[in-house]
Amino acid sequence: MRAGKSILLALLAVAALYAFGRFFVDSLGGGRGSEAAGVLLAPPPGFRIAEGGELSRLDAARRLKAAVESAPAERRLGLHFRSEGFELTWLVDRSDPATPRLTELSAGPATRVESVYAGELAARLAWAAAHGRFDAPGTPPVESHNLYH
């Protein structure tokens, strides 16, 4: 009888340890998936966004420049497209004429980044239409932020 009690107590202790271990592991979560949880890559409300499909950055810059020039009264517009494995949204915000902003939202295989190019909108669009990038010489530096933090 005494051996039976000892075995029963040992089984109860093992079951309690197993249950505690499962509870602890489950409370840690399932780990990280391949996509960012809770990070949405979407423009703020109020922007008129054109869909570009698959484009090179150079072609996208030319389209955005043409859209900006053809709609001078439009204050907030943008272009959403895919290029080289990235999903991008380029936004032009001219609501404050003194400091127009060009914002790039990019999503790649492992990251989400927001890059803001302040001022010099015409120079940046002209440079991008020729080079596919907004970092025109003589313009203020870009401010980039990882959207995970």
Image: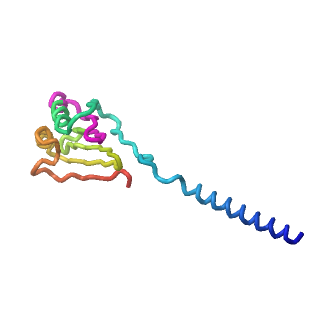
> Residue reaching furthest top?
70
Observer able to see residue 77: no
Observer able to see residue 61: yes
Q: Is residue 87 magenta?
A: yes
Q: Is residue 72 above or below residue 3?
A: above
Residue 55: image quadrant is top left
Residue nearest the observer in this picture, 14 or 59: 14
Range of magenta residues: 67-89
The color scheme shown is rainbow
Residue nearest the observer in this picture, 41 or 4: 4
Residue 106 in picture, x, y percent from top left: 30, 44
Q: Is residue 110 magenta?
A: no
Quadrant of the rendering where the N terminus is positioned? bottom right
Residue at the (14%, 45%) spot, across then down: 120
Residue at the (20%, 39%) spot, across then down: 57
Residue at the (58%, 58%) spot, across then down: 25
Residue nearest the observer in this picture, 3 or 141: 3
Direction from residue 62 to residue 9 in the image, left or right? right
Quadrant of the rendering where the C terminus is positioned? bottom left
Residue 79 in picture, x, y percent from top left: 26, 34
> Residue reaching furthest right?
1
Residue 65 in picture, x, y percent from top left: 16, 34
Residue 49 in picture, x, y percent from top left: 29, 32
Residue 3: image quadrant is bottom right
Residue at the (32%, 45%) spot, across then down: 108
Q: Is residue 39 above or below residue 13?
A: above
